[in-house]
């Protein structure tokens, strides 16, 4: 019986791992049916609904669907490769799996299963996705998720797949264990590192891993003396080469569960972006310098509306550090009045070279760019909102009974949403003299829908718009080159911009408008699409998304002329949350998979 408290969503993990909540079964089906202007390659029919996973690997070679107790994998033609019950596939009788996720690899992928047993020993099993064979199982690993709680989705806090090593790092109370992903064989174990893996970098030249920890919910209550650790480890034997501390707490995004932390190795130094920027000597782990500040990477809009029926978090408010050969530029969130400014630091010593004027009234400063002797700063613009909304969801018999009802009714579930939003603020384009940090010029002509900045290839011109206008500026002088009335295109207010060769395409509420970079003249306008809230550039293909009125429509767009290639409207669950319920798209953007209960449809984007 499915847990009613589970967050009903699907996640795409960084790299090639995907995760969600489902079971698919069926063979190849009808071909050649039109879906809008798209062509359906095939339709598959399944023998049960995808209540856990319903997702394809990045290439479309495998399509997997799971429920609590079984899985099915289809091939690229929609034919069943294998289907079976977990208790028959696994030798340790792993069965009711509250927690499942997939890891996609060059060899195919792994299905990771976790069977939390209330009155016994927890079970883990890993299944080979291409064959359906059990690769290994174990009852050694306990406390991987909090007892009696929903596991959620995505990788476990206590299990991290290391792509470069084809191995799982498993956190336990006293140690961290690295095991081969395909056999479960222990490679090494160390008690020098405690907690979950917040993020890592693999150094191929030295066969080393640099990683930092965080306190996972599952292990949080199990050990005392926890401390923030940043370690460099020999990947072959687990020897800890150095152990350092770091400042701050690793948070995870609300919906995607992506850790809000970055690390880079540059020129013999390790840079950690968490609560500011901290720089370490890669050889010794010694901290060289730090610029500690509240980077506001995971701002909050508050947690409750009408009795905790919505949880929201804001992201991408502050530009990432901008590195050059000798310097790094940081957007700083200042004191309590949320004043922001830009600092330039010497990369070697960390010395502050200059600080810009204080920029008051700026809720977000999401992008900075270096163009010759000018640092271009975007003040205002879109930021990402991730939400969980408690909504009424139709249920089958088991869900109805779980609520103490008679089945076939409805129940409350947390439904994920990811979208972009704006706030009124002092929006502007700011040019800072790179030598002095002084303001070279600033334009404040923009409403709250100021778009992202697009720089010309020679970095002499910057293009930017807002809800009603589209502008071009000479970067060196700040002279306005043109001002085009975007509202004359009759496609609604601008929401985003796309850099497309010699043109800038302005994504708007009701369609697209394209402008020539040379003079701002309009190349085309399209009024065929309404309610677009997101765009995707996948391979050589562009897609727009409309999620109004609980729908999820994906449009394929020809950016050369604004024409719509076709559209797909989701009618079910599964898929990847980055595309919305019921939709998954291959990494080359050539195929869309639409999931609906017992059916999956493979759709060709370019006819």
Image (tube, grey):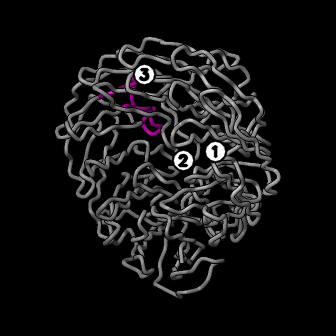
Q: Quadrant of residue 413?
A: bottom right
* Residue 327 marker: 3
Q: Nearer the viewer, residue 300 or 168?
A: 300
Residue 246 placement (x, y as % from top left): 41, 22
Q: Secondary structure at mark 3?
A: strand
- Disc 3 to disc 2, C-alpha distance: 32 Å
- Location of mark 1 (residue): 386
Q: Residue at x 56, y 31 (%)?
A: 368
Q: Residue at x 47, y 17 (%)?
A: 291
From the image, state whether disc 1 or disc 3 is nearer to you: 3
- Disc 2 to disc 1, C-alpha distance: 8 Å
Residue 421 shown left or right of residue 589 in the figure: right
Residues tagged 2 and 1 counted as in contact (Cβ below 8 A): yes
* Residue 335 marker: none
> Where does the N terminus fall, quadrant-wise?
bottom right
* Residue 256 marker: 2
Part of the protein shown in magenta = 212-231
Answer whether residue 204 is visible to the viewer in this image. yes
Q: Residue at x 74, y 23 (%)?
A: 361
Q: Residue at x 37, y 77 (%)?
A: 82
In the rendered view, tell whether residue 211 sits above or below residue 556. above
């Amino acid at each position: 019986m499915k847990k009613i408290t589970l967050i009903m969503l699907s996640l795409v993990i960084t790299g090639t791992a995907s995760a969600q909540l489902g079971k698919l079964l069926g063979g190849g089906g009808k071909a050649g049916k039109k879906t809008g202007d798209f062509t359906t390659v095939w339709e598959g029919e399944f023998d049960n609904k995808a209540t856990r996973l319903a997702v394809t690997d990045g290439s479309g070679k495998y399509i997997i669907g799971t429920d609590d107790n079984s899985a099915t994998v289809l091939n690229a033609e929609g034919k069943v490769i294998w289907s079976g019950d977990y208790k028959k596939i696994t030798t340790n009788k792993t069965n009711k799996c509250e927690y499942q996720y997939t890891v996609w690899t060059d060899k195919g992928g792994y299905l990771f299963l976790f069977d939390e047993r209330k009155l016994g020993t927890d079970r883990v099993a890993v299944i080979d996705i291409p064959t359906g064979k059990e690769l290994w199982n174990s009852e050694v690993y306990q406390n991987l998720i909090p007892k009696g709680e929903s596991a959620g989705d995505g990788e476990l806090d206590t299990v991290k797949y290391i792509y470069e090593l084809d191995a799982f790092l498993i956190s336990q109370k006293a140690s961290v264990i690295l095991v081969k992903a395909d056999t479960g064989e222990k490679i090494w174990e160390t008690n020098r590192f405690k907690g979950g893996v917040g993020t890592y970098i693999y150094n191929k030249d030295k066969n080393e891993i640099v990683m930092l920890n965080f306190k996972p919910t599952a292990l949080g209550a199990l050990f005392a003396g926890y401390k923030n650790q940043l370690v460099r480890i020999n990947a072959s034997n687990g020897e800890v080469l150095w152990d350092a501390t770091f400042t701050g707490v690793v948070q995870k995004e609300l919906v995607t569960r992506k850790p809000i932390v970055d690390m880079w190795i540059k020129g013999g130094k390790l840079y950690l972006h968490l609560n500011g920027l901290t720089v370490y000597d890669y050889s010794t782990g010694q901290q060289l310098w730090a610029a500690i500040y509240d980077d506001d990477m995971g701002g909050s809009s508050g947690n409750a509306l009408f009795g905790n029926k919505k949880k929201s978090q804001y992201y991408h408010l502050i530009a990432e550090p901008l590195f050059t050969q000798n310097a790094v530029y940081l957007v700083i969130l200042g004191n309590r009045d949320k004043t922001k400014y830009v600092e330039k630091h010497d990369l070697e010593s960390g010395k502050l070279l200059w600080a810009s004027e204080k920029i008051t009234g700026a809720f977000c400063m999401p992008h900075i760019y270096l163009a010759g002797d000018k640092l271009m700063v975007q003040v205002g613009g879109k930021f990402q909102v991730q939400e969980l909304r408690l909504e009424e969801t139709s249920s089958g018999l088991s869900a109805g009974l779980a609520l103490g009802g008679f089945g076939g009714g409805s129940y409350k579930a947390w439904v994920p949403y990811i979208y972009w939003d704006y706030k009124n603020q002092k929006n502007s384009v700011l040019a800072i003299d790179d030598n002095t940090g002084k303001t070279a010029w600033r334009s404040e002509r923009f409403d709250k829908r100021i778009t992202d900045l697009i720089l010309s290839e020679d970095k002499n011109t910057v293009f930017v718009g807002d809800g009603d206008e589209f502008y071009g500026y000479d970067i060196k002088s700040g002279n306005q080159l043109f001002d085009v009335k975007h509202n004359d295109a009759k496609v609604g207010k601008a929401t985003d911009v796309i850099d497309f060769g010699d043109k800038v395409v302005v994504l708007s509420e009701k369609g697209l408008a394209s402008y020539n970079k040379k003079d701002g003249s309009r190349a085309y306008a399209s009024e065929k699409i309404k309610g677009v809230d997101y765009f995707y550039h996948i391979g050589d293909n562009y897609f727009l998304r409309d999620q109004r009125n609980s729908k999820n429509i994906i449009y394929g767009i020809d950016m050369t002329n604004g024409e719509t290639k076709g559209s797909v409207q989701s009618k079910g669950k599964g898929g990847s949350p980055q595309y919305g319920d019921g939709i998954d798209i291959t990494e080359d953007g050539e195929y869309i998979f639409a999931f609906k209960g017992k059916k999956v449809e493979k759709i060709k984007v370019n006819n």
